[in-house]
Image: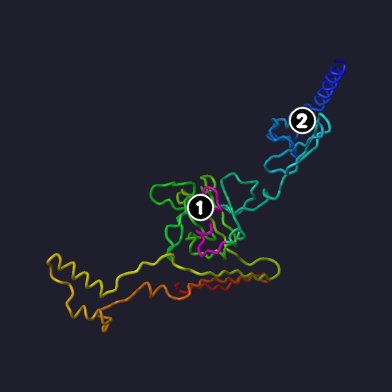
């Protein structure tokens, strides 16, 4: 019995020791401009324990001595601090990597930190890994709230339909597209010539363009001469096209015979005479008795397609930008 009592007292002492290690950690979070409101504080070892700062930048959270607190706020560098005392004073540093990024807007350029409208931008680097021949296809999946639907794969008609935040008007719901400040179609621009693209999604950001911007605005800036040493870049791709399935059509002679048979069953006059049938069968006069297999004529060759783009720019006494482009394809099958 004495041994049992001794063990109970030991467990009680351990529990009291562990309880003393847990404490209410309080403190304040600020930056160079003053206290920060809305800073999220979480315990790294137990993310379920979290809190945030009030208007005065003050906080209070339960944590054990030796645990790590994570301080995070949009626009500031994330900070981790180990709990060594019951009171902490934290100062966060602004993150300039994204806030100082320049974005093209309707009236010029602005830094992201100064933007008040819904504007999203991408650069030419975001389009380099996409082997496409039109801009609308290259933009698929690059902008939040922007839907691009490609209705056809026919060459020359494979441009996508763009919708910014759904349908804004009942008739023409296409956004306004400006290329270097001039209204145009984005499918007239080669993706390799694009420097950056900005999408103005809401009313405040697109208000400068008036009623034409009711469905949003797409601003495209093309590449120009740059200050510095001459630069030469090359990009290209190659591939093969192969039809998934080609239908087999009836030849002219077989069609003429079956059509005559169908008319005879209906007791109607025959469409082709015996001389016509003989002409289709012998293929003696292709102009009068044509028998062209258009699929075999069009879908021939290796199906090789290739595109090469060579760009050169420099800046000396005057800006210079030039390019050489080759795009070709062979008929497939």
Rendered location of residue 188, percent (x, y): 48, 64
Q: Position of residue 94 (x, y in %)?
A: 73, 44
Q: Which residue extends farthest top?
A: 1
Is 280 located above or below residue 144 in the figure?
A: below
Q: Which residue is mark 1?
A: 217
The residue pinned by badge 2 equals 63
Placement of 269 over or under 137, stated as above or below: below
> For the residue labelled by badge 2, is the local secondary structure a helix, a strand or a loop?
strand
Q: CA distance from mark 1 to mark 2?
A: 50 Å
Mark closest to the chain's N terminus, 1 or 2:
2
**Magenta stretch containing residue 139, yes or no?**
yes
Magenta part, dominant SS: loop
Q: Residue at x 58, y 69 (%)?
A: 236
55 in relation to 139, above or below: above
Q: What x and y, as percent, mark residue 109?
A: 61, 53
Residue stretch rendered in magenta on the structure:
130-147
């Amino acid at each position: 019995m004495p041994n049992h009592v001794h063990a109970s007292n030991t467990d009680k002492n351990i529990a009291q020791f562990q309880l003393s290690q847990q404490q209410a950690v309080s403190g304040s979070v600020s930056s160079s401009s003053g206290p920060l409101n809305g800073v999220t504080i979480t315990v790294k070892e137990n993310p379920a324990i979290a809190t945030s700062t009030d208007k005065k930048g003050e906080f209070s959270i339960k944590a054990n001595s030796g645990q790590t607190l994570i301080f995070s706020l949009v626009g500031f560098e994330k900070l981790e601090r180990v709990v060594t005392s019951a009171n902490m004073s934290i100062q966060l540093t602004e993150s300039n990597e994204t806030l100082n990024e320049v974005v093209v807007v309707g009236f010029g350029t602005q830094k992201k930190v100064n933007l008040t409208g819904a504007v999203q931008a991408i650069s030419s680097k975001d389009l380099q890994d996409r082997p496409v021949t039109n801009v609308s296809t290259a933009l698929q999946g690059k902008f939040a709230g922007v839907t691009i639907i490609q209705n056809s794969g026919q060459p020359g008609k494979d441009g996508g339909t763009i919708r910014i935040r759904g349908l804004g008007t009942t008739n023409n719901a296409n956004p306004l597209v400006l290329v270097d400040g001039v209204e145009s179609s984005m499918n007239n621009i080669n993706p390799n010539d694009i420097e950056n693209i900005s999408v103005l999604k809401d009313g405040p950001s697109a208000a400068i363009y008036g009623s034409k911007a009711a469905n949003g605005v797409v601003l495209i800036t093309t590449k120009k001469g740059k200050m510095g040493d001459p630069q030469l870049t090359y990009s290209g791709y190659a591939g093969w096209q192969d039809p998934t399935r080609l239908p087999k059509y009836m030849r002219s002679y077989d069609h003429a015979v079956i059509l005559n048979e169908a008319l005879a069953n209906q007791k109607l006059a025959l469409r082709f005479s015996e001389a016509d049938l003989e002409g289709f069968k012998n293929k003696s006069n292709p102009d009068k008795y044509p028998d062209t297999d258009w699929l075999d004529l069009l879908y021939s060759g290796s199906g090789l397609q290739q595109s090469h783009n060579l760009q050169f720019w420099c800046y000396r006494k005057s800006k210079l930008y030039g390019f050489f482009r080759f795009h070709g394809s062979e008929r497939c099958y």
